[in-house]
Image: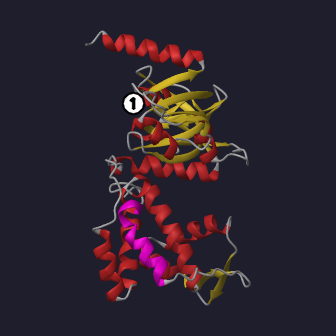
Amino acid sequence: MSYRTALTERLIQTLFKLIRRPHSRQELAREYGVNAKTISRDIDALSLEYPIVIRREGREVFYQFAEGFKFEFPQISIEELATILLAQKSIAGIGITAKGSVYAGYADSLLEKIRKSLPNSVRERMDALSNVYGSAAIPAKNFARHTETIDRLASCAVRQKRVSLYYHSLGSNEEKTRVLEPYAVYFDPDGATLKLVAFEPNYKTLRVFSIERIANVKELNENFKRPKEFSLKEYLDDNCFNGIHGKSVTVRLKAKGITARIFAERKFHPTQKTIEKKQRRGASPETIMIEMRVANGRGLIRFILSWLPNVEVVSPKEIKEEVREVLLKGLENF
């Protein structure tokens, strides 16, 4: 375990310990296998965000939350616990909690504790249902060797510290040092990979970087201010489609036959809406026209190609021409 990962885990555990009851410095030092000075530094860091009180009894130092500070664990019903257990494959199978990721151990221990807390009859029922219900598996990558990189980026994002890193871009096939302001780390199901959203001052824009192509992350002694209105979900909705980032474009697609039925029942993007829908008449198949405002680029083109030959690009003309060019180039290989 890297130093930063151990520090993060220790700080989180210390918070939970102090929520339950006061702890002495020596007690914490023994539990974590560190010296008293390390615990003092940990408490100093936590005190910047939480109302922790330090009191002395003789030669011993005790830490506790200030009087009046309340933290109540939510009351969770057996039904709710059972639901979490039933969804265990989805919860711990992909993304940040997937095997080999930073929080895989936490996910596994959480689910095991939930399992043990349930009555035998309920647990047996959930085990039986888990063999009936399920979700499609995403072949997530093993990010174990990137643990320190992920932890450092997340830490700097929380504390709003700039970083310097070495990045290999597949697009340009170049490697160079970049200075970034990390905003968020997220799991991208397209390619089952972890990515970083960061503002790049040199280009004055937000960019996305694949975690596995990041090396030598160094925290800089420079602060930045992430806009309060920044939302990762809204950013991805506006700037990412089918795993690829780009500028937003409003596209209209017309589907026919069975594909029209699929388009009618599926939601490919939050902005999707039906513009026109026609039922089958004689030899003419049923059709549907949908409109979405999504990120332009390879992700959109790949999406359209995956539904051919039963989908037509109605607008914009530029997208229609791009799909046509891709098809013509593809024919050269056949």
What residue is rendered at 68% in x and 65% in y?
49
What residue is rendered at 27% in x and 68% in y?
131
Q: Is residue 79 magenta?
A: yes
Toward the front, the furthest residue is 282
Which image quadrant is residue 75 in? Answer: bottom right
Which image quadrant is residue 25 in? Answer: bottom right
Out of 160 and 327, give the one closest to the viewer: 327
Residue 282 at what x, y percent from top left?
45, 30
Q: Is residue 209 magenta?
A: no
What residue is rendered at 33% in x and 82% in y?
123
Residue 170 at what x, y percent from top left?
41, 25
The reply to whether residue 215 is in sight is yes
Which image quadrant is residue 101 in? Answer: bottom left
For the record, the magenta segment spans 78-91
Q: Which residue is mark 1?
A: 306
Out of 333 and 215, give the one closest to the viewer: 333
Could you tell me what secondary structure mostly forms the magenta stretch?
A: helix
Out of 91 and 254, give the one closest to the viewer: 254
What residue is rendered at 38% in x and 71% in y?
86
Residue 138 at what x, y percent from top left?
34, 49
Out of 23 and 294, give the one closest to the viewer: 294
Q: Is residue 159 left or right of residue 33?
A: right
Helix, strand or loop for disc 1: loop
The answer to whether residue 159 is above or below residue 36 is above
Q: Amino acid at mark 1?
A: Ser
